[in-house]
Image (cartoon, rainbow, N blue to C red):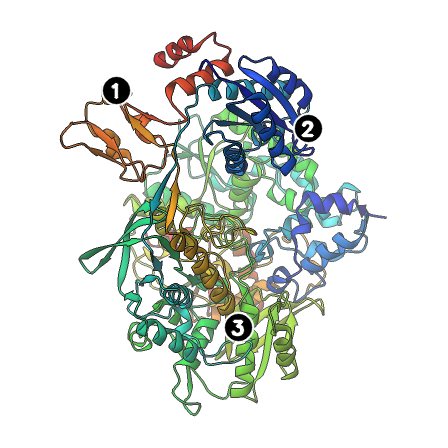
Amino acid sequence: MLQIESRQFAVERGLFACIQCGKCTGGCPMAMKTRLNPRDLIYRVLVSGNGFNLEGREELWDCTTCLTCYSRCPKQVNPMEAILAMRGAIVEKGKIHPNVKTALESTFRNGNPLKMPRSDRAEWAKELQLKAFPDGGAEYLFYIGCTPSYDPRGQKVARALVRVLGSAGLDFGILGNDENCCASEVRRLGEAGLFEAMVEENTAAFTELGVEKMFTVSPHCFNVFKNDYQKLEVGAKFSAQVQHYTQVLADLTRDGRLKFNGSFEQKVTYHDPCYLGRHNGIFDEPRAILQGIPGLELIEMDRSREKSLCCEGGGGRMFLEGTNPGTRLAQQRVQEALDSGATILATACPFCLLTLEEAVKHLNAEEKLRVLDIAEIAERAL
Amino acid sequence: MTNAARVGVYICHCGINIAATVDVPAVTEYAARLPGVVVARNYAYMCSDPGQAMIQKDIAEHNLNRIVVASCSPRMHEPTFRAAIAEAGLNPYCLEMANIREQCSWVHPVGYPTTWKSMQLVEAAVAKVTRLEPLQTRQVSITPTAVILGGGIAGMQAALDLADAGFHATLVERESNLGGHAARFYRTFPTQELAGVLVQDLLERVNQHPRIRVMIETEVTDVSGYVGNFRVKVRRNEEFTEIPAGAIIVATGFETFDPHLKPELGYGRYPQVVTTMDFEHAFAGREDSKQPLVVHEGSQQGGNASLAEANDTRMDHQRIQIENPKSIVFIQCVGSRDQSVGCGGNGSSAHSYCSRVCCMVTAKQARLVRETFPDARVTVFYMDVRAFGKGFEEFYDQARQDGILYRRGNPSEIIKRGNSVLVRAEDTLLGEPVEVEADLVVLAVGMRPRPDSEAVAQLLKLSRSSDGFFMEAHPKLRPVDTSMAGVFLAGCCQAPKDIADSISQARAAASAAMIPLMRGQVQVDAATSFIDEELCSGCGQCAEICNFSALSLHPLRGKMTVNAVLCQGCGSCAATCPSKAIMVHQFTLDQVLAQMAALSGWDDVSVALEKVETV
């Protein structure tokens, strides 16, 4: 039996505040496709007396952690966190999906979930001659993250961003092969113990390096540093000011340090990544960058900003198929982008970039729509 | 110490409120040994009749002239004990209370330190009470008129009742029309009367009443004075008028929740999404039932403006003409029972409350839709249906029997689907997510405090509850009073309510206001400030800080004088005076220092004074 102490579980997470209105499930992008029903889960925890059985609840792994549930809740209940805690209980009992196991083991051994060697982490930058933080006395730490470090598509984004930042004269350095995974996906996959250990390790490293200001490529890394690290009481307190790169670029554009001398004559629609938008309320900065690019026409999809449709790449879903492998949400999203009349689907997240690009291929829409990261669009307009 | 001080000390158990934490007998014993104390006793409830009788008996038998009651906050029972000792022949100001409940037993654990603190508080009270002077309260005649702020149905009704009882009432309305929100409603629930007829009836009676003066397009700029003799300064255009009033009724109303704050519902983005207010105005504004129904988004933003004016100002807003709709969806609790939207953007959980009217507004409008478009499918998404009023449940029963489908679940979002919209929700009774296509979605928006309520609160020194509405003096026993004597509340400025409840509260506020107006006189507290003319240099700093305009320079003597009727005894002047020429009765330097000396363990008052001066 795979049981949680449901009463204590519910009290600790404020689940008794739930009034069963169903807003979480009504907005959940996975609820239409799979058995996942956040409201029903909460209700069953509440009525299960003192033990709720997680056995066979495969739908817990469907959650993309898009946070629509919490953002709609009128009583400030957070179903997503409850689901993550249930995953944690399953992982704690050692019942882990093989793919999850591989990703977690790789993160533990190699500092990335992608089964890539540590020594290759800075390969993407070997011809760029970037400052090593903090030896050159750089103002910012540019934290790259695993996907932009190793994935060929992600690497293009990292390199584009380096060029854009360079043209604005921003003083930054990187950690190279010493950079370690931020552990965001470790947390989403329910491995609380490993997550805690990595937070401790990374915080100690950042403290020793004297990191005061840093920014990331991925909204996932940004979110975990900004919101989750500070909540954990382990060893040194994480205190650096963390930004997502779109915030940095928006500031540079506003201050006139980043100038676009070229143009980008395209109809662009912007897909809000969950971890930038709903999780952190950053809706305007990415749009401000795009609107500042000469020739670019920004079109909004029906579901934008708070209503943005998840691409299904978060919550560990880059490593998990989920119970309904059918049409991925990214395909639905690409269809919405096509309907909007845009020729470019812009985003600002490596996971979104990969899932959306895959969906474009699936829909044979490569001729009509290209997926680009905002950093890549900015680079083209320098 | 006054030579002849004979003090009685009474320690209250307050049931177990004090006695379970504080060793009451030990405090009594301690009090009995304090200088000047003739008798010290304790009792289960000092505020009860036997408790008060005990004090009165001791006053007679032991010839007491000063009383200390150690119990709850003076806010609670000071008036009780003052009245009790006055009945026994003592001056009511020869009383001091030691608050050993709120400031001791309720906030500290059981144990000696808590009992010791009670002893110290009692000792300080005894030190002070021996120095108190008897004071004389005054009777002041009042202005037998009332000012009512806000000309909605509550304000109009309150004005009518006061005027019918023989008092002159001035109705001050900011907008150019009386009638408020109700003037633009179509029908009322549960009786389906035309709201316009109800309002028109009130309006005519108000306009024709010889004792009601209506001031439209007028704002209150300043309120001074006190119960019985307020002075309300108002402005119309650039013209200022001062209205004397014995009582003030606040009936400033509400505004509806702005659904733009819930972007997932697409209000302002999809013309198909409107509010119950927009929908009501569409019906009310239609001249006959053959005319097409045109709903304007944002029509509630016109406030009290007339329909014609509203039509002009809403040209920019989206509009939708409803013709042969196939599906109409109502959504309940938009901006109500919702902690994710605050009031005034301060992040407080201001919209936690139920707005009380939306369930019935929805049922009424759904039935109206059923009548107007018999072929349309009408769905109401709800969390709980609250049909608590007289005739409400029956009305809701009829709504369902009319064929309106109630589905349990609060929609999470509305998205576009071709020319209509898709309401995405979970039907929680099925336990399944559902998508309902709709030609029109009506959001049942709740009520919230007007954005100017903070300003009004400051003008009248009113408190507001955490939800932002004006706070009544007591939720059960004094529901129309405020903490300011002579200022009363009516209608939705106090909390969301329907027309019937607004009228009830308006009539209650009017009759509460009549109490001082009819009595003709009010008693004024004697604990006011006073001037030591030897020390006063007439600099006027006190007059600048006084909130009640109670201080002025005597034209001949060149010294400040206190208008004891206006003075509220707040002490700001005493704290400001650079020459220590002003003090407040009951809080003189001598009295307060004696208290401090007792609390601090300093030997005598001169040490305390020295310490204070070095600070």
Q: Which of labels 2 and 3 is toward the front?
A: 2
Which quadrant of the structure image shows residue B61? top right
Give left or right: position of A50 versus B291.
Answer: right
Label 3 neighbour load within 10 Å: few <14, some 14-19, many 20+? many
Q: Are marks 1 and 2 on the same chain?
A: yes
- Amino acid on which the number 3 mark rests in the picture: Val
Dot 1 corresponds to which residue? B579
Q: In front here: B280 or B192?
A: B192
Q: Residue B350, position in %: x, y?
A: 50, 52
Q: Which mark is residue B361?
A: 3
Instruction: Answer with left or right where residue A118 lies relative to residue B524.
Output: right
Q: Dot 2: what SS?
A: loop
Label 2 amino acid? Ala
Q: Indicate the chain on which mark 3 is placed.
A: B
Q: Residue at x 57, y 63 (%)?
A: A330
Residue that badge 2 annotates? B19
User: Label 1 amino acid?
Assistant: Ser
Name the outermost residue toward the right: A1
Q: CA distance from mark 3 to mark 1?
A: 63 Å
For the residue pair A93 and B259, the one nearer the viewer reads as B259
Q: CA distance from mark 2 to mark 3?
A: 51 Å
Marks 1 and 2, how far apart at CA: 45 Å
Q: Residues within 10 Å of mark 2 (few under 14, many from 20)?
A: many
Q: Mark 1 near mark 2, Cβ–Cβ under 8 Å?
A: no
Is disc 3 placed on a helix, strand or loop?
helix
Tell me residue A288's x, y (percent): 36, 54
Q: Using the rendered image of the protein, determine whether residue A111 is visible from the camera's viewpoint.
A: yes
| Closer to the camera in the image, B586 or A332 | B586
Q: Image height check: is A350 above or below B570? A: below
